[in-house]
Image: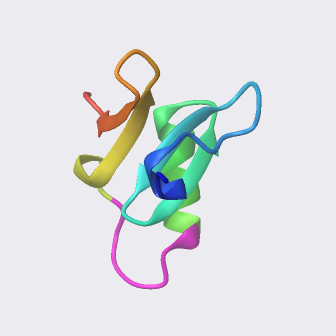
Amino acid sequence: MTHHTERPCAAVGLTSYRYGHIMIGATSTQDALNEANRSLTHGTVTVDRLEIWNALTGLYENVTT
């Protein structure tokens, strides 16, 4: 069975993102970064650690800016 962090978890109408082990449903990359920042207790959020769900490949991929 696939672990839940390897599947999209966003609600309908949102895009699935992942920041490390933090699963995020967001409307945009900036929204996902804001949510990740809200969830972190230490450090600063950087876009290079953010991944987005690609429905065509069925995998999370690095966000391209």
Q: Which residues are magenta?
A: 39-45
> Image point 35% across, 43% down: which residue?
51
**Residue placed at 51% from the left, 43% from the top?**
7
Q: Is residue 64 left or right of residue 55?
A: left
Residue 17: x %, y % from top left: 49, 43
**Colouring used for the render:** rainbow
Residue located farthest toward the right when viewing the structure as drawn: 12
- Residue 35 percent location from the top left of the image: 58, 56
| Magenta stretch, overall SS | loop
Say which residue appears at 36% left-offset and 34% top-offset: 59
- Residue 4 is drawn in which quadrant? bottom right
Does the magenta-highlighted stretch encompass residue 12?
Answer: no
Front residue of 35 and 1: 1
Q: Quadrant of the C terminus?
A: top left
Q: Which residue appears farthest toward the bottom when viewing the image?
A: 42
> Please, which residue is most extreme toward the front here?
1
The answer to whether residue 15 is above or below residue 8 is above
On screen, residue 32 versus residue 21, left or right, reads right
Residue at 77% in and 28% down:
12
Q: Residue 43 in magenta?
A: yes
Give left or right: position of 46 versus 35: left
Q: Position of residue 56 (x, y in %)?
A: 40, 15
